[in-house]
Amino acid sequence: MKKELGIFTLLLVLCGVTAVMNPRFLSVTNLTNMANIIGLYGVFSLGLGMVIITGGIDLSVGSMFALAGVLLSMALTEWHWPWPLAAAFVIAIPMLLGWAHGSLVTRMKIQPFIVTLCGLLLYRGLARYIAGDGTKGLGNAEGFETFASLAKGKFFGLPAPFVILIVLSVIMWFVLHRSVYGRYLLAVGRNEDAARFSGINTRFVIGTSYVLMGLLTGVAGILFAFYTNSISPSNHGNFFELYGIAAAVLGGCSLRGGEGSVIGILIGTALLQVLQNLVNLLGIPSSLNFAVMGAVVLFGVLADQFFQNRAAKKLVRH
Amino acid sequence: MRGIAKRFPGVIALDDVSLDVGKGEVVALCGENGAGKSTLMKILGGVYQPDGGEILVDGQPVKINNVTDAMKLGIAFIHQELNVLDNLDVAANVFLGREPLLGPFKLINSKKIHADTEPYLKRLGLNISSRTRLDKLSLAQQQMVEIAKALSLNARIIIMDEPTSSLTLTETERLLELVRELSESGVTVIYISHRLGEIEHCADRVVVLRDGKNAGQLNHDEIAHDRIVSLMVGREIKSFYVESNAAQTPGYLQVRNARSNRYPEKMVSFDAARGEILGFAGLVGAGRSEIAKAVVGLDARGGGEVSLGGQKLAINSARDAIAQGIYLVPEDRRGEGLVTGMTVRENVTLPSLARFTSLFMIRRDRERTTADEQIKSLNIKTPGCETAVVNLSGGNQQKVVLGKWLSMSPKVMILDEPTRGIDVGAKAEIYRIMRALAENGAVILMISSDMEEVLHVSDRVAVMHEGQITGVLDRADCTEENIMQLAVGKKIASAKPAFAN
């Protein structure tokens, strides 16, 4: 809980500073926009967080977005599938790929970094090939207006992705912090041997975390496709895995596994998006965008390390 | 070495131990587990600093502060677990840290390093290229590379800690031959081994340690199996064994043809009674822990057939064993027994979480009740059930491991070195818990390398030697001498078979 408190303070401070220096930060348009984007990024960051908690990693998210986007566009505008079928299809594909990642990690004992790095290259290439390396689009959503309004409309005056993120977060909170499966995720991430000695099916737990990741990637992929409305397979979703990893780490997930919380991941995601917004609103050259983000993540992790060391020393003295 | 003393927190490992070795002599160092052999050698090798006594080399007192000092004096230590880098080639291993350099950029002189390595390999009769990667070599060959390294350091004294424990018969013979050759060329070899046959074969002198003291020595013509064993044991152990009056059902647990991956060609079968504590004694490396893991399904290929109360069980994973009430308290508490970053509550409930759920949600209040029960009944000293296990002492950590299984009414409980590194008070409590469990009708298997513990706690003792049970001793025959005889692989008359058909 303390961990989240630290980063939450940082988030509030950044919001405060930006609001004071440019009151437009608090305008309804800006806040709505930001909520929308936080929704988009939050959904897959949650999934990435679960994988990171088991001690794994998934680098293939961005490429899966490209693949999902291309397939969604083609299913809806070229093959004219009914939208529920198209949605199910576009969510099922990343889940299937996630299952494959999980199996390679648990059965073949290949490192998650390698497995998903290959995924990153493979799915990007596939997406470009399937799309004939051309840009695909969703047009005016003719024939699937309901779907479009679900993905980019508003609920209770809030952008749909944000509402979806809230709903998924509540579910994921129960899964991670209250269910047996969530406890197993944390146990396996901390000490796989001890978990196995306690009779936990560690392969199943780790493997399904990648499937869960696939599910959330599929949902986020649909939201993001509707957000951009046109999908250029060579750069759609580029670097998204890194945003997700950064959010999870800022939010207190340890890349060694066994640590992390849903609240932390949400705050981490929000912090990254507020930073982007801050760069825009404060007139910082947008070319510095990445540099600012990198610096803040580094600072956050350093601060966390500092406080942990201090806590450890305190413990020894007692 | 004169009057060497070494204390570790809570134990005196060495007390006034002396050891003299002559040039070119082969000295075997013997003793039970924990007699202080390795500690003494680690002091000579510079790994530990003695708390008292002095070391003289060529009559000159020397101070060995670290491994480098030992190397400078010509003392090389070949550990049981080899210290080789198996991703590098032979030459790189032999000259690690002393690579011959070349040119202004100080690059490794690859020609010279290989040329310099060859003569050592030749001297050891090792028919391999200096360019072979170590992971392409057998264990015996890797060991030879370590010896080559020792020779390249101009070692005058080579210490070998159980060098033959993982070698095949022919490899062992070759190594012993080499030991003789080394001694003929003036190198002293100190040889720690449990294999008395080898010692009879190749040692000039045997020095025996017992409980961190010199127990005596035997010169070449006096070396005999029985004399070594009687020096190794010889101490008075007052037994605190209390006759158990639990009703016993013999043959309740039957294990047939279990195998360990350490000795895959050897089968282990045994029976244990309901209500008894069956001790598993043996020297370190006899394969006891591996068998335990096989029985609880952690080594899928080795489990053999397990039946409980006449019913055959299908055990293919730890889950299967746990479902049948067969639990293991592993030797490595922190690595395998506990998720140390988690709280006492989370550890206690981990194997049986499903019991604590309603509507798929874990009920923490129920978890807390169970954890608090265990804390109370096992007298676990912790601020509360929400304390991370990592903050508890070793004894209390072990009680948490016990607690997680006790909350699930064990039928068979296997405890591997249950009191290692635990203080005396907590030990007594753990023994009490084990006895109470047995009296409640569980089968307790206790693996222990602590002779006192074996004699104090077990109702019967099964003794293992190199992957097999050499015999089972009834309570009346449980003496240190008998156990040691069986542990070094000798058959004795009072030993019973491990199972009845």
Image (cartoon, coloured by chain):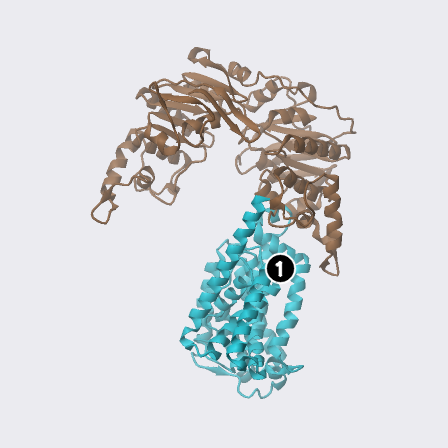
Chain colours: A cyan, B brown
On-image quarter of the C terminus of chain A: top right
Query: Which amino acid type corresponds to the residue marked 1 in the rendered image?
Result: Met
**Mark 1 crowd level (few <14, some 14–19, many ≥20, 10 Å Cα):** few
Q: B56 above or below A63?
A: above
On-image quarter of the N terminus of chain A: bottom right
Identity of the residue drawn at 45% across and 63% down: A118
**Residue B213 in picture, x, y percent from top left:** 51, 19
Q: B297 above or below A11?
A: above
Q: Which residue is mark 1?
A: A1
Seen from the viewer's position, the closer of residues B485 and B421 is B421
Residue A82 visible somewhere in the drawing: no
Q: B333 above or below A204?
A: above
Seen from the viewer's position, the closer of residues B440 and B153 is B153
Q: Is residue A314 left or right of residue B276?
A: left
The quadrant holding residue A107 is bottom right
**Residue A249 in picture, x, y percent from top left:** 52, 62
The quadrant holding residue A26 is bottom right
Chain name for mark 1: A
